[in-house]
Structures are given as C-alpha cells and as structure tokens.
Image: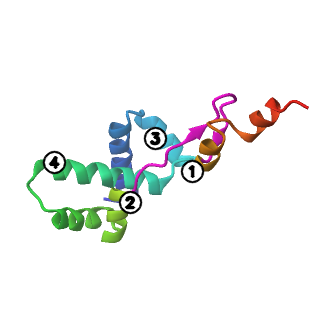
Amino acid sequence: MSDAQIYDLYAQKISDITNIPYPYIIALRDNGLLNQKEARDKLIRYDYWKLMKTNKFTHNQILEKLSGIYDVNKRKILYAIKVKPKRVYYCRQCGLQLSKVKYMRNDGICDKCISKQIKL
C-alpha cells in the first residue's frame, strides 16, 4: 500500500471518530487546513483506549503496536495519550477568545469590554 492509501484509511477513521463527513476531511487535508499532528494524536488516543477497554493487552504491548502503526516513538505515543485538551475561554459580552489568565482576572470579560464600561 502506498502512503496516500494509508492516509486515506486514516482519513476515513478520523471521519468515523469525529462524525465529520469523509469528503470534508479529504478537502481539508488537500487544502492544507488539517492539522496532521492533532489528527494523528486523536487517532492514537482513540486506538489506545479502544485496545485498553478490551483488557487483552498490557500498556506496553499497546504502546509497541501503536508506535509501529503510526511510525512514531513511544514517547510521542505517551504524550498523545496523556495530553489534556486545552480549554478555550471566551468573553461573556463580545465572544472574543481569551487566555485563561485574562478570563480569570476579569471575571470572564475581555479588556476591551472592561474599557467600554469605564465612565469618566
């Protein structure tokens, strides 16, 4: 199998996991809009937990298999499994994306909206 065929199989798997139609995944990939690292990590997490739930294999056996399938070392597999998704924060008034620090500091309101509330 060529790399393109393998990747098309991965695209189908991503489509099944995320419930995004397969043609959209292919279009995003072809236009360079698909973050391939994130897609690979999502596949790794999905496969890891699917195999762990079977209780047939040990942690190390699964790591070894996944590192062979996705052609990455065990450290990257562990990172993909352990990484927590970043929480996204938005301003409660205008909807602007904020960092966690700004969200916590201003009680969920961005600096621009805070400045609009200042009365002189």
User: Which residue matches tag 4?
Assistant: 53
For numbered disc 3, what is the local secondary structure? helix
- Find numbered disc 4 in the image and state the secondary structure of the residue it sits on: helix
Residue 95, quarter of picture? top right
**What is the C-alpha distance between the residues marked 4 and 2?**
29 Å
The reply to whether discs 3 and 2 touch (Cβ–Cβ < 8 Å) is no
Q: Earlier in the sequence, mark 3 or mark 4?
A: 3
* SS at badge 2: helix
Question: Magenta stretch containing residue 98, yes or no?
Answer: yes
Q: Position of residue 23 (x, y in %)?
A: 45, 36
Between disc 3 and disc 2, whose residue precedes? 2
Front position in the image: 15 or 103: 103
Crowd rating for badge 3 (residues with CA inside 10 Å; few <14, some 14–19, many 20+): some
Residue 73 showing in the rendered view? no
Name the amino acid type tagged 1: Gly
Name the residue carrying label 1: 32
Which dot, 1 or 2, sits closer to the camera? 1
Quadrant placement of the C terminus: top right
How far is disc 3 from disc 4 in space, using C-alphas? Answer: 27 Å
Contact, mark 3 vs mark 4 (Cβ under 8 Å): no
Left or right, 23 with reference to 110: left
Disc sitting over residue 85 in the figure:
none
For the residues labelled 1 and 2, the Cα–Cα distance comes to 17 Å
Q: Earlier in the sequence, mark 1 or mark 4?
A: 1
Of badges 1 and 4, nearer the viewer stands 4
The segment highlighted magenta reads: 83-99
Q: Which residue carries the number 2 mark?
A: 3
